[in-house]
Image: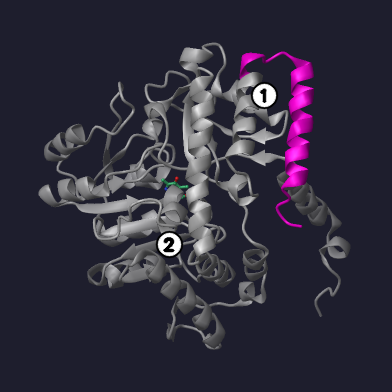
């Protein structure tokens, strides 16, 4: 028999940590650009009995019996993903965005093949070929970057680089580049050098699903996504592709890179994608970007430098070197955390400090927008952030902002 009491009685230590995290989320302003809050419905799906089920294979073709209900769930996730993005084929099994990228590399490349992707310090991701990640160890990787003057990707340079390097795969997409990618242009470059084009939309899945950003489906052979950043479908990954590559992708994920799919997470994806198909979600995605622009205006007015001068999306990358040369990204992260504003330190283009210190912070609006923040609240938070950077030793100021953070959180509960 299973213990029949709830978590609090069965395992008070874990329960206390979960409660602590819930309180932390409710009582802090979450401005890490890759985080968000899912609905109660997604939480319920992810915490369901589907975690008990093995379902190696795909709907209608499994290696285990008893899959009729998980087949329904996975098919709903697939159908909704295809509808959201207008894709021919969706694989919703990748456990994370990194596993989605691994699936594409594993399907289409051999070890030693060449990948051209965005430099990590210019906003790229570890799984795009960084040497500490498998992608940098198994493939030959070169990177393109942003124009040091404008902070925008230098597409002419990218095209020249592709001609010189002759990659097998070009990756578009980023973790910290504040501008929209020109997927069409990168698709053309990829065609010219006979490379595949992978658009990694991990950060902007929700902005594309909400119709605020251009959709790379059609300009990219593969689109990889995370399902927990700007879209609120719970932790996980996904791959979209054409009919032509569907079978190769499915095989690369299972049995290639993964075993049994996490059916409870796939249920979360189905529910979150269903929510993303509504008009309310499109309004949410628009508000995320409007809020980021409002924040950009406050920062710029108060003298902060933003990489590329602003944003098209849900995040800003603040380069502190001009305005606050003695404040590192790490200092800023700690100072803001002490008053309940959570951001992350981030490298900036031309970075000279270590990734553990950095010269920048990345600030995002998806989670606060989920809590119902609009421009006026975001602008207020922006003013506090700059006040705190300007007067790092003012304890009265910290106390005052901390109380305001408490008030804003109480006015905008996540889960009531
Ligand atoms: C977040 C992110 C991923 C996926 O990350 P996981 O933590 O593995 O889900 C992939 N690519 C980019 C560009 C990202 O920002």
The first of marks 1 and 2 along the sequence is 2
Q: Residues within 10 Å of mark 1 (few under 14, many from 20)?
A: some
Residue located beneath label 1 in the image: 335
Looking at the image, is 240 positioned above or below residue 388? below
* Position of residue 349 measured from the top left corner of the image (x, y, whole percent): 38, 25
- Residue 226 image label: none
Question: Residue drawn at (18%, 51%), measured in percent from left and top?
Answer: 195
Residue picked out by circle 2: 238
Q: Dividing the image into 4 quarters, which one contains the C terminus?
A: bottom right
Mark 2 crowd level (few <14, some 14–19, many ≥20, 10 Å Cα):
many
Boundaries of the magenta span: 389-416
Task: Say whether residue 49 is left or right of residue 318.
Answer: right
* Residue 236 visible (yes or no): no
| Left or right: 351 in relation to 143 | right
Q: Nearer the viewer, residue 209 or 294?
A: 294
Most frequent secondary structure within the magenta stretch: helix
Q: What residue lies at 76% left-to-right and 53% top-to-bottom? A: 18
327 vs 145: above or below: above
SS for dot 2: strand
Residue 237: give x, y in percent of width and height.
Answer: 46, 59
From the top left corner, tell me how far across and down residue 332 is, in percent: 60, 23
Q: Nearer the viewer, residue 165 or 76?
A: 76
Q: Is residue 391 magenta?
A: yes
Look at the image and tell me in which quarter the N terminus lies: bottom right
| Image depth: mark 1 or mark 2 in front | 1
């Amino acid at each position: 028999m299973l213990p029949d009491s709830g978590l609090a009685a069965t395992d008070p230590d874990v329960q206390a940590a979960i409660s602590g995290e819930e309180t932390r989320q409710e009582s802090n302003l979450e401005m890490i650009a890759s985080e968000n809050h899912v609905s109660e419905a997604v939480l319920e799906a992810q915490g369901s009995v589907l975690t008990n089920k093995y379902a190696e294979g795909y709907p209608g073709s499994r290696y285990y019996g008893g899959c009729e209900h998980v087949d329904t769930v996975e098919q709903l996730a697939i159908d909704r993903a295809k509808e959201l993005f207008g894709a021919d084929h969706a694989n919703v099994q990748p456990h994370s965005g990194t596993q989605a990228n691994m699936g594409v590399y594993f399907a289409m490349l051999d070890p030693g093949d060449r990948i051209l992707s965005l430099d990590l310090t210019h906003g790229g991701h570890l799984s795009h070929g960084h040497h500490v990640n498998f992608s940098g160890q198994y493939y030959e990787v070169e990177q393109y970057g942003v124009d040091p003057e404008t902070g925008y990707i230098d597409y002419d340079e990218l095209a020249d680089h592709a001609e010189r390097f002759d990659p097998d795969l070009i990756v578009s997409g980023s973790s910290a580049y504040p501008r929209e990618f020109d997927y069409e242009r990168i698709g053309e470059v990829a065609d010219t050098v006979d490379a595949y084009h992978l658009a990694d939309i991990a950060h902007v899945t929700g902005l594309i699903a909400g119709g605020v950003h251009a959709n790379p489906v059609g300009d990219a052979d593969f689109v990889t996504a995370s399902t927990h950043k700007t879209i609120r479908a719970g932790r996980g990954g996904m791959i979209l592709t054409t009919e032509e590559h569907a079978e190769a992708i499915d095989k690369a994920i299972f049995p290639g890179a993964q075993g049994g799919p996490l059916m409870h997470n796939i249920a979360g994806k189905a529910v979150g994608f269903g929510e993303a198909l509504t008009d309310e979600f499109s309004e949410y995605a628009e508000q995320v970007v409007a809020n980021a622009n409002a924040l950009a205006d406050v920062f710029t007015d108060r003298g902060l430098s933003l990489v590329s001068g602003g944003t098209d999306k849900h995040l800003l990358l603040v380069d502190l070197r001009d305005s606050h040369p003695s404040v590192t990204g790490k200092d800023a992260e700690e100072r803001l955390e002490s008053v309940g504003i959570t951001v992350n330190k981030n490298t900036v283009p031309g970075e000279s400090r270590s990734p553990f210190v950095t010269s920048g912070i990345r600030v995002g609006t998806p989670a606060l927008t989920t809590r119902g923040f609009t421009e006026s609240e975001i602008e207020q938070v922006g003013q506090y952030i700059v006040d705190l950077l300007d007067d790092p030793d003012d304890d009265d100021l910290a106390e005052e902002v901390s109380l305001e953070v408490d008030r804003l959180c109480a006015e905008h509960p996540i889960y009531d």
